[in-house]
Image (cartoon, grey):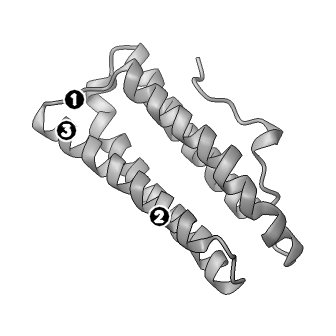
Amino acid sequence: MALFTWQDKYSVGIQQIDEQHKQLIKMINELNDAMLTGKGKDILMPVLTKLANYCVSHFAVEEKLFDTYAYPETADHKDKHHKMTAKVKALISEVQSGKSTISVEVMNFLKNWLDKHIMETDQKYAPYLNSKGIK
């Protein structure tokens, strides 16, 4: 059962970014499915590592667009990216040290972060970049 389902409301109107957001949703759902079937421990580190790496590459794509098109809220958006990357890295460290395991709380954090990031933060830049011809 999917924890997070792509909906048209998440679209920022930029195909590359929308596809990347769909991949992030897929990774969160993969981790959730593993937790629900008792396989969370087996794939937790590989999926968290994949998620962290994908976030970094996804954020780089967004930030390159911001820099290229002089998005006025670049600094704030980059700061949010930095904080999320730090949170995922901290979660990885906690899992590696045995302080944390996959849980409903972790899954809800990931889902809620992505939902909020897309709906609030990313939706802010969409009209600006779309007006620059980025689709």
Residues at marks 1 and 3 touching, judged by CB atoms closer than 8 Å: yes
Report the side of 117 relative to 7 (left or right). Answer: left
Q: Which residue is mark 3?
A: 94
Q: In this orientation, does residue 125 appear?
A: yes
Q: Residue at x 65, y 45 (%)?
A: 22
Compared with 109, 34 (above or below) is above
* Count of numbered tags: 3
**Residue 90 place in picture, x, y as percent:** 26, 47
Residue situated in front as seen by the camera: 72 or 13: 72
State the separation of the CA atoms marked 3 and 2: 22 Å
State the separation of the CA atoms marked 1 and 3: 5 Å
Report the side of 19 relative to 111 (left or right). Answer: right
Residue located farthest toward the top when viewing the structure as drawn: 37
Compared with 43, 17 (above or below) is below
Return the disc, 1 or 2, that comes first in the chain's sequence. 2
Q: Amino acid at mark 2?
A: Asp
Q: Residue at x 31, y 43 (%)?
A: 46
Q: Secondary structure at mark 3?
A: helix
Q: Which mark is residue 48?
A: none
Q: Which residue is mark 2?
A: 79
Local crowd at mark 2 within 10 Å, few (<14), some, or many (≥20)? Answer: few
Report the side of 128 relative to 81 (left or right). Answer: right
Residue situated in front as seen by the camera: 73 or 94: 73
Q: Which residue is mark 1?
A: 100
Residue located farthest toward the left when viewing the structure as drawn: 97
Q: Amino acid at mark 3?
A: Glu
Return the disc, 3 or 2, that comes first in the chain's sequence. 2
**Residue 88 place in picture, x, y as percent:** 35, 47
Local crowd at mark 3 within 10 Å, few (<14), some, or many (≥20)? Answer: few
Q: Residue at x 64, y 70 (%)?
A: 73
